[in-house]
Image (spheres, grey):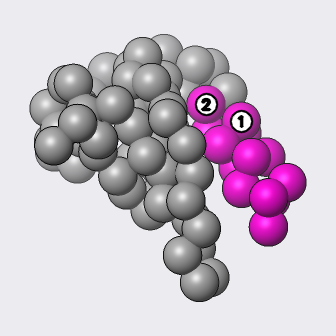
Amino acid sequence: QDEYKTKDIGEAAALHSSGIKLLRLDKDSNFFWFIFESAQAEEVSASYWSGDLIVKAKTYNDSFRSLKERVFSRG
């Protein structure tokens, strides 16, 4: 599989702030899927969910805001 997808914006921000390329957003009824390149995405996601992922707080916050703005601009 060459794509990784999640509907969790916190996870998406972690992936984005870790340098994983966001390919697109796909709308599915009342929510969006964040679609990323799969290279390293599963590893980063596992680190995020286990609490082991380390990223700069400002980078994470900037990613979260950017993704949130994209969702609401496409609403």
Which x, y percent locates residue 53?
26, 28
Q: Main secondary structure of the magenta part?
A: helix
Q: Which residue is mark 2?
A: 63
Please tell me how crowded label 1 is: few (under 14), some (14-19), or many (20+) other residues with Cα within 10 Å. few
Q: Is residue 53 visible?
A: yes
Q: CA distance from mark 1 to mark 2?
A: 5 Å
| Quadrant of the drawing holding the N terminus | top left
Q: Which residue is mark 1?
A: 66
Which x, y percent locates residue 30?
62, 82
Instruction: Give the residue displayed 48% in from the left and 15% down from the top.
Output: 56
Instruction: Give the residue displayed 31% in from the left and 21% down from the top.
Output: 54
Which x, y percent locates residue 70?
74, 46
Residue farthest right in this picture: 73
Secondary structure type for disc 2? helix
| Quadrant of the drawing holding the C terminus | bottom right
Q: Is residue 61 left or right of residue 65?
A: left
Highlighted range, magenta: 63-75
Residue type at numbered disc 2: Ser
Using the image, determine if residue 10 lies above or below residue 28: above
Instruction: Give the residue displayed 71% in from the left and 56% down from the top.
Output: 71
Contact between marks 1 and 2 (CB within 8 A): the answer is yes
Residue type at numbered disc 1: Ser
Label placed on residue 10: none
